[in-house]
Amino acid sequence: MKGMRLLPALLILLLVGGVSVTSIRSCLVSHRESMDEEDVTGNEHSFITDTYDDDAGEEKDTEFESDTEYASSYVPVPIPDFVNSLLQDADWWADTVCVVNGTAYYLGYEGYCRTSVLFNKERVLLAAPMVQIDSFASGCDTKFYVSNAAKRVLVDFSDEKTLEKLKPLGATLPSFMRYRKDTIAEFGRTVFYSFAADFPDASVIHSDAIRQWLVKLIERSQALDEDLPYVTTISLKYSKRPYGGWAYKGNVNDNEKIARFIASIYFAIKKAEYGTNDEDYPTDLFSDLNLQAVVCNNRYVTYQEYTNDFNAGIHGYYTERLVSYDHVHQQEIDCDYLFKPECMEEILSVLQEEAEKTHQYKEWQPNIMDGVAVRDEDGNRTGEFTLPTPGLSEDGVVFSFQPYAICCFAAGTFHFTVPYSRIKHCLTPQGKWCVGLD
């Protein structure tokens, strides 16, 4: 069984593998509470309305109409009410993972890519922003690797005890609050923006500094050129959004204003791109930004950053990686922060060795060297290389390669962990301090 991938790849697998899925579709319609919004340039965005706000814990006044269509090849998968209740207005797809003693386990994808859910008919086993499942190399049909960017666990669905390993993958860290806000804009067609982030409360050490850094991440999320490979941005014509230098100048402790700020940027970009004529808009247009805190200690904090952007077509484009921040010295952690310049070739060599040990690498045989190569304007290699943004996990430094960077889109993202012990001598003094090897 090929490793099940993310929602965009599911459409490709349908064509070649006959995967059984179900779409339960609910369309947002026009009756919504109108709210004025001032965008980053000072113009009013009267077309922006809110849909659901987890921070408030209640749903806004919204009506829905059923517009469900099923392809004849689809086999219905039951979506329990307790799965639908995770997100309002959800359009779920579900793929069967395995069947154990008559109990089927499903991996569900929400239509706007706001969450992934692993469940059976009785309960939700895991709900997280992004989950990947790979079949076990032994060929056992009940053992699977379940992972996000930070951690991978081996789970045997025939053993109830091992299912407890899933909980940490989706859990909110202590003293962090998961805030979500979904917003729509009505110009041309309905455009949807989803924002979610784990914000630290005042009890978290240097919480204000962490929030300031999060705002910078949120600002940069609209510039889709960071860490994207040449083949994506040039060959496949995925357009880069200009970052534009937009800066949030409000209260960093006001989750509501932060959410509306980033939604306003996205809507301003789309309005400038498509105008107000509905014939110029794709049928579906939405974007998602999700920042899940996965590690926080007295030296650094690490978030899983997930973005998804859909502008119609066969599939959209998403990114998933770990980003880390030294909140003591208020420095974003990158390769220059962590590694000695003279050790970069050795780091790349160790990365290649560790990648080759993973099941995902053995299954897909990606080309890491192609993903790190620096290219000129014509796409030719210059002989230099640059590593992806490193993220700090509990187990080591994680390097993430986005779709198309080193393999086909169906392979999804690749996250390779290099143990700290293997590269201790390559770390800078501040890098050793940060990961606790000083």
Image (cartoon, rainbow, N blue to C red):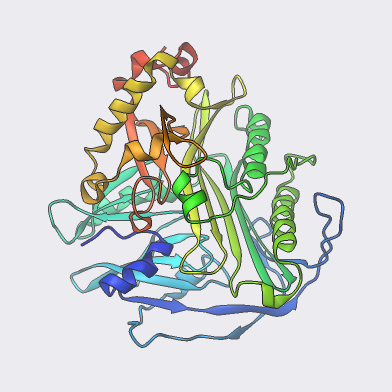
Relative side of 129 to 47, left or right: left
Q: Is residue 62 visible?
A: no
Q: Quadrant of the C terminus?
A: top left
The percent coordinates of residue 403 (x first, y second) are 41, 51
Q: Nearer the viewer, residue 207 or 213?
A: 213
For image coordinates 50% across by 46% down, the residue present is 172
In the rendered image of this protein, does residue 143 appear above or below residue 103? above
Q: Is residue 352 visible?
A: yes
In the rendered image of this protein, does residue 16 appear above or below residue 436? below
Kindly give the residue lying farthest to the front in the view shown.
378
For image coordinates 59% across by 59% down, the residue present is 287
Relative side of 161 to 94, left or right: left
Q: Image quadrant of residue 180?
A: bottom right
The percent coordinates of residue 298 (x first, y second) are 52, 24
In the rendered image of this protein, does residue 400 appear above or below residue 157? above
The percent coordinates of residue 92 (x first, y second) are 46, 72
Relative side of 52 to 418, left or right: right
Q: Nearer the viewer, residue 257 or 297?
A: 257
For image coordinates 70% across by 56% down, the residue present is 263
Q: Quadrant of the N terminus?
A: bottom left
Q: Image quadrant of residue 244?
A: top right
The percent coordinates of residue 51 (x first, y second) are 68, 67
* Circle count: 0
Relative side of 348 to 47, left or right: left
